[in-house]
Amino acid sequence: MIRTSSPLVPRLNSLFDMSAESEALPATSPVLLPVALDQTYDYLARPGVDLAPGAFILVPFGPQTRIGVVWDRVVGFSDKPVNVKKLKMVVERIDVPPLPQLSMRFAEWIAKYTLSPLGMVLRMMMGAQAAFEPQKPRTGVRAAEGAHLPPRMTPARLKAMETAGDGLIRAKSALAAEAGVSSGVVDGLVQAGLLVEVLIPERSYRAPNPDFAATTFGEHQIPAVETLRAAVDGRNFSVTLLDGVTGSGKTEVYFEAVARTLAQGRQVVIMLPEIALTSQFMDRFTRRFGAAPVEWHSALSGPERGRIWRAAATGGARVVVGARSALFLPYENLGLIIVDEEHDPGFKQDDRVHYQARDMAVVRGNLGKIPVILASATPSIESHVNARTAKYRHIVLPGRFSGVEMPEVSAIDLRRHPPDRGRWLSPPLVQAMVEARGRGQQSLLYLNRRGYAPLTLCNKCGHRFECPQCTAWLVEHRFRKRLNCHHCGFMLPIPEKCPKCAEPDCMVACGPGIERIAEEVAERFPDARLALLSSDLIPGLIEMREMIHRIEKGEIDIIIGTQIVAKGHNFPDLNLVGIVDGDLGLGQADPRAAERSFQLMHQVTGRAGRALAKGRGFVQTHMPEHPVMQAIISGDRDAFIESEIRQRQLGMLPPYGRLAALIVTAREKDMAERYAREIARRAPAAERIEVLGPAEAPIFVVRGRFRWRLLVKAPRELDIQGYLRAWLAEMPEIKGDLRLSVDVDPYSFM
Ligand code: ADP
Ligand code: ZN
């Protein structure tokens, strides 16, 4: 739901203006709550409770009490005078560091830009419930000093005392588990005075040391290192685009900026897409700085998130590495932001508050007057344009540090070299895999499609298996023996007969998913060790990291994966990369489709031959003459960028024009359509702003909700938010289960 945000008006001051009585009025504070509202509420101060701006406090809100923040100004406008008698009183202040003023300004900026209620942005910033809960002091045990073990000890007691012999403090349960004894044994030892109970200190994070291991830079890297150091030393806002092929040393180079910032005593945040898969990154960081960075991602436990939130606010977390939400931690003294793989579409969040974290990182840098580094082997067109117009500094690292050349990429024209019937790998690709195997090298096959087959049908009546709640085919997942909808999660065990014509065993799979590729590879290479990397086949972070580790160690011969294999890994034995379907993703209605295909293919093929020998890449395609394919094969990145920039310019597409999407959904088809048409009718007329639609969304139904889309196009220099705000103010009331969401700078057009 959208509420128009209102000008920030210092309401209390104007209402109770400096008049003589004002001194008699009780003190009030504007409080922002983490809910979908765009205003602060006034609360009466409780005598003796310090309500400095930023304080987290407990307040009554409707029938509940909730945690809010004392804001440093009133947000939202109301012309009704405040009746002080009716105001409720703050319950208490919560013992947690205050929200920094910079975070408040940042939240206001995001709310205004994304047209989200300010309270929802605050909610993102409070994304660690446990930070606000009372810190229960935890007690543990350790061996009593100077205790002499009595002569007759049971074996269990002996074991526990041996474990505790290292003098460390452990929770009772942890000691029992480690020693393999019951908790009764531990209790008994406490009673006997052999173990003592002590408070467990709150976990602290080891500080990375900027001088732990110095790097010697090559002559091509030195100018980049110097530029970045100067940016940090300048203690001012700047954006640097650090551009260079995979393996050129971008990470190594930006570590110097991290070191410089640490030496200033300031904090660093490094944002990575797919933080779950970055154990290699963590190891490298530790080798360079002698301590691991603080990791922030969704797989952490609640209490751990709480600890990190606090550590960001107190400065105890020096370097945080995380996914996009790491940007919203309440850093006490942030000095540098790095966005690695800045082109990655994973930085766009598409629920609740729709924001592009890379862009917000630049905003945060500007507000905090600190440098921002954007790193990528395939920078986004937006960043290229900003570099050309000198908004960003552009540093290019030439070639790979190892000197190993980038892989030679060739297209395999599937019209000339079709795979055998029912197979998906063309003869030239298979031949190359055989040769790589002969040399003891790894191969990787990439297909961005989970499951066994994207479409399943009955070979007798032609019945197609479709999701009952979405406009989507069900995808067969053969390993898990079911049909799955990739939009809503609906699933069906694979039926024994056709639900329509009752023919038994009639299901045929159409097209390949990665499970089907794995099946073909297993048949062709029966003694090869395969790894299948797909988010739905690997249960969690730990298993995924284990698998990556096995690949690094050379315990795997052939890797078959979806886009999770494209990111950040360095597999030393990998020499051959095959893209099974290079046409996937080309020719959509999405203005960034070509760019994204180029990036993905470049990144996947860039995995080959990083360490020792020049690798090879093959792209199977039906259209080798397509410009994206030509750019990949020729390696002529600049020509591709040039042509993309021209396309964007001609079409007034980002970054030359601005886009916003309005998405209307409802369970009832007519209701969604009527509302979408009505709002289109009310679109304010404005010169040079175009409103397209409403149109049925390409995925028309998701989870039983019908979806209509409108697209607003405006020239870059126009205030598209202002336009949208004026429009939203005129919209008919949202009734029933209608939903309207606004997506400024959309990345998804589905
Ligand atoms: P990128 O981030 O551009 O992919 P990396 O920083 O990961 O590149 O560097 C690629 C490889 O080269 C890594 O193994 C890295 O440790 C090594 N490397 C890069 N620069 C240096 C250097 N100056 N000294 C030693 N090793 C380096
Ligand atoms: Zn579905």
Image (cartoon, rainbow, N blue to C red):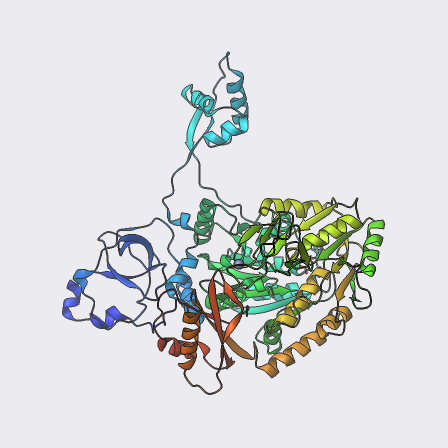
* Residue beneath the point at 63% across and 70% down: 593
Coordinates of residue 170 in the picture (x, y in percent): 48, 32
Q: Is residue 706 visible?
A: yes
Q: Is residue 223 above or below residue 51?
A: below
Q: Is residue 544 above or below residue 702?
A: above
Quadrant hosting residue 432: bottom right
* Residue beneath the point at 50% across and 65% down: 701
Coordinates of residue 301 in the picture (x, y in percent): 48, 45
Q: Nearer the viewer, residue 143 or 502?
A: 502
Q: Quadrant of the C terminus?
A: bottom right
Coordinates of residue 747 in the picture (x, y in percent): 55, 69
28 relative position to 518: left or right: left
Q: Nearer the viewer, residue 299 or 424?
A: 424
Q: Nearer the viewer, residue 422 or 238?
A: 422
Coordinates of residue 47 in the picture (x, y in percent): 21, 53
563 relative position to 87: left or right: right
Q: Quadrant of the N terminus?
A: bottom left
